[in-house]
Amino acid sequence: MQAVAPMADVLSLLAGAAENMSGPRSAVSILVLDSHGLLRNGASPNLPADYLHAIDRLKPDPNVGTCAAAAATGGVVVTSSFLEDSKWAELRHLPLALGFVGAWSMPIRGRDNGAVLGTFGTYYRDVREPSPHEIEAVTRLADVAAQAIEKNAGPA
């Protein structure tokens, strides 16, 4: 019988891989939808606990941030500058306080039905958009994240 790694361990490894690819001026956060449809931290190895607490239980909303918007729309959401994006009006102070100026998020979709299971978000300390290579790589990492999420009950 093959042992299955705990979801949190798998998601942490995936977040670390995405951070290594995106460079030292980035941080990755994988959020998972809970049974109530709220975004919960799945793995965010380089974001402080107070930040994670502040964004815990966000509702998917196309008009809020990048992760909540990606979860609501099922599409990639890019914010090259928090200061210039109205979706960040109520939350921009949180990542700006950590030195991040932009982010992008990709939905994590179920393998069978395509339902959104969570989001794969990358924060940047520079105004920029993800490269085609980053989008391709995170697409593959998100597929692995979907497998891990589907094999586990998810966060409480």
Image (cartoon, rainbow, N blue to C red):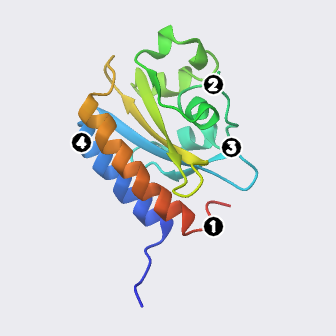
> Is residue 120 visible in the rendered structure shown here?
yes
Label 3, residues with CA under 10 Å away: few <14, some 14-19, many ≥20 = some
User: Residues under labels 2 and 1: Cα distance?
Assistant: 26 Å
Placement of the C terminus among the 4 image quadrants: bottom right
- Considering every residue shown, the one lying at the far top of the view is 84
User: Residues under labels 4 and 1: Cα distance?
Assistant: 29 Å
| Tag shown at residue 64 | 2
Q: Does 33 sit above or below residue 89?
A: below
Q: Residue 46 lies in what quarter of the image?
A: top left
Side (left or right) of 138 relative to 97: left
Q: Secondary structure at mark 4?
A: helix
| Tag shown at residue 57 | 3
Which residue is depicted at the point 32% across and 19% down? 128
Label 4, residues with CA under 10 Å away: few <14, some 14-19, many ≥20 = some
Q: Which residue is mark 4?
A: 21
Q: Pick whichever of labels 4 and 2 is earlier in the sequence.
A: 4
Q: Amino acid at mark 3?
A: Arg
Q: Which residue is mark 1?
A: 153
Q: Pick whichever of labels 2 and 1 is earlier in the sequence.
A: 2
Which residue is depicted at the point 56% across and 50% down? 41
Side (left or right) of 47 relative to 116: left
